[in-house]
Amino acid sequence: FMPASLLATGSERIVSGLFLGTALSISSVKIVAMVVREMNFMRRDLGQIIVSSAIIEDTIGWVIIAITIGIATHGRIELASLAFTLAGVAAFMAFSFTLGRRIVFDAIRWTNDTFRSEYAVVTVILAIMGGMALVTDLIGVHTVLGAFVAGILVGESPILSRHIEGQLRGVITALFMPVFFGVAGLSADLTVLVDPELALLTVALVAIASLGKFGGAFIGAEVAGMSRSEGIAVGCGMNARGSTEVIVASIGLSIGVISHTLFTMIVTMAVITTLAMPPTLRWALGRLPMGEAEKKRLEREEVDQRGFITNLERLLVVVDEGVVGRFAAYLAGVIGAGKPTTVLRTSGESEADPVEAAHLDEIEKGAEQGREAAKEADEEPAHEAPLTRRTHDAPLSAEAVAKEARKGYGMLLIGLGRAVTAKGGFSRRLNEVAGAFEGPLCLVLKPAGVGRQMPRLGPGSGRILVPVNGTANARRGAELALAVASVTGAPVKVLYVARPGRDEPRDTVSHRRREAVLKDIVALADRYGVEIETAIRSRAAAADAIARQAGRNVALIVMGVARRPGEELIFGETTSGVLQRCPCPVMLISDARLRRDDEGREALRSGTGTG
């Protein structure tokens, strides 16, 4: 029923109808996600349904658009050509989300680990995008489908750090988006809307687009068993077209499917629906209450956002062939489940019995236990992540660790035998390895008086003792202990170690601070599904209080500590006292190393450094 004047010269009406119908059904994922996030609904159940629906709809829409463009290039529907296009798209999608996903992941990881250039990964991502766009062009559909699928695969890459993602967004925002919208703006002529007939047709187009989108989403919500209010919110949320519609319209204009007048009408429709969507969605979402189960999930995810272990992106592990190394490898699997992990294995403890690939087996064992624990807790288990092994026959040098660390790791976990001296200090070998890494450290240590056998953590084993004092490092240690306990089932005791002195009244600031710290850790334990025991000790020195508790069926001590400035690895008198006196293994997690170079000092003075 569209007037013939709106058709492009030489185009088939059925092809233009297919293109326009598909274009009207697409939503802008970016606009939907931005509004849902601004409404603090991104983590709500309904917010996730709206955004997920927009993503799935967008993906299907781009496939249909690509096929429609393949039809348009032939000027009419040819069954043989259509069958070839459909088969090509199906094969491309099947390959992309199976073997292609692995190829993209490996390419990004290899580039990140091999090249020292600042923008090497961004270059490879753009090359992947161009290559996949070329493939879709060769099978007879538009390049936009290849670029879109490439974006999905790149976004799923486990090596795509926040730093690299920020660089990529900068290139897109600063270069591609202004150029695209500038070109699109040059193709739009708003003066055509002065014609009353075209203005009425534009209003009709907006009405058809809005009613069709709202009606389809609302009916889908009703069929899915959602409430009437939720259906209205889904319908309002899916109505924004945003930049996606402009992209589709630009493609249609470039291949001669739509005219310049219809292009202007489509762009106008996209602007109006995008402007109308935020207030209507805010109104719809404001009428929805929050259920108890959803409230608990949001509280758990809020704890995750402030966590260290949950936001760890990549793990570097340095272990020898001894019992400490194997125990550290197991803990690395528990902590790093679902995170890319690199293991640097080195020779070391002479009393050990080397077993080929034992460390990889321990890491896999810990990761598998983590996945099983997630299933039991009704959480999504972590996906299997790349595990890289590098073996050094000679003692591992600081240069080798520093070279590997440059590839980008969130934490270094070290498990070396005979790393603790009788006075609670550290061996030269451990100092060298730890000194080569600038980020957070996790040390698995066996004090001099502890036997060869390392603990087997479990429900019937000794407790994990977690000393805390209210600092950020202590909270990080508690989080690490709870992450291990949630997988192994080992009982946990949190010991608040206060400064020596007499017990203070309950209404003092110090006492309230202790209760606030323990309350925060109890909330953290609830997040991990671990029941903990808490206690406060204030009548003895910290090391004495910890040592006294360590003698009461404690299998492992986990402490958050702070590095002291200097070339030597020092964590303070309390840590040295614990390593000197406690009869069980100790796990230390520290903050990032203090920067001592001139550049670091200047950055700290100017307020731009991380410290």
Image (spheres, rainbow, N blue to C red):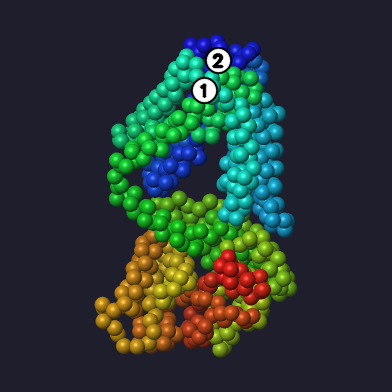
Dot 2, crowdedness within 10 Å: few (<14), some or many (≥20)? some
- Residue behind mark 2: 6
Q: Is residue 325 left or right of residue 275?
A: right
Q: Quadrant of the C terminus?
A: bottom right
Residue in the image at 37% along x and 52% along y? 297
Q: Position of residue 391 (x, y in %)?
A: 70, 66
Q: Amino acid at mark 1?
A: Met
Q: SS class of the residue under badge 2?
A: helix
With respect to residue 453, does 268 lie above or below? above
Q: SS class of the residue under badge 1?
A: helix
- Residue behind mark 1: 265
Q: Amino acid at mark 2?
A: Leu
Sequence-wise first label, 2 or 1 = 2
Residue 538 occupies which quadrant of the picture? Answer: bottom left
Residue 333 occupies which quadrant of the picture? Answer: bottom right
For this rendering, which residue is in front, 343 or 81?
81
Q: Is residue 240 left or right of residue 522?
A: right
Which label number is shown at residue 283? none
Residue in the image at 38% along x and 77% along y? 495
Q: Give yes or no for contact between labels 2 and 1 (Cβ–Cβ under 8 Å).
A: yes
Q: Position of residue 104 (x, y in %)?
A: 65, 45
